[in-house]
Image (spheres, rainbow, N blue to C red):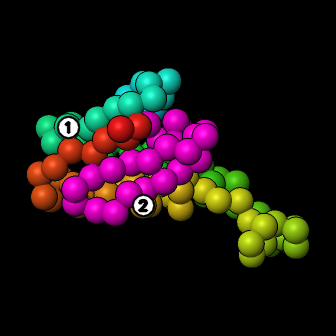
Amino acid sequence: MLLTFKSAADADVIMFGDVAKKLVEILGKDPQDAKGIITVEQLPGAIARLRAAIEAEKAGQGGQAQDDDEEEDPERRGMAAPVNLAQRAWPLLSMLELSQKEGVPVTWGV
């Protein structure tokens, strides 16, 4: 399943369902709703929640850094490296910020 986020301020952002649902939940909306909107009034809070989730993930990864003697798994580098929340959320965060700047809502599922 794909979910498309739309705003008059930016190009559409298309995400796979599981990732999109996680981000919708972070934004403070019901991830089970097929359609939704982040109003202009809700944008500052949604942006703050998404940034906080990104920072929390970064802080958690900082505690999991490898020891100097421990070698990196060669299977988990480059294109095989896991994609973190910041990488997945960046296009949506950018859309939210542009939407706030232009005073337009963000919708999905419509």
Q: Earlier in the sequence, mark 1 or mark 2?
A: 1
Q: Looking at the picture, tell me which residue is in the foreground, 96 or 26.
A: 96
Quadrant location of the N terminus? top right
Residue at image position (13%, 58%) is: 102
* Residue 55 location (% of width, % of height): 45, 52
Determine whether, in the image, residue 63 is placed left or right of residue 10: right
Q: Tag 2's secondary structure?
A: helix
Q: Is residue 74 magenta?
A: no
* Residue 79 location (% of width, % of height): 74, 72
Residue 99: which quarter of the image? bottom left
Mark 1 is on which residue type? Answer: Thr
Residue at image position (74%, 75%) is: 78
Determine whether, in the image, residue 22 is placed left or right of residue 106: right
- CA neighbours of label 1 inside 10 A, class few (<14), some (14 to 19), many (20+): some
* Residue 7 location (% of width, % of height): 27, 52
Q: Which residue is mark 2?
A: 91
Quadrant location of the C terminus? top left
* Residue 42 location (% of width, % of height): 21, 37
Q: Which residue is mark 1?
A: 39
In this orientation, does residue 33 appear? yes
Against 97, residue 43 (above or below) is above
Q: Label 2 near label 1: C-beta < 8 Å? A: no
Mark 2 is on which residue type? Answer: Pro
Residue 92: which quarter of the image? bottom left
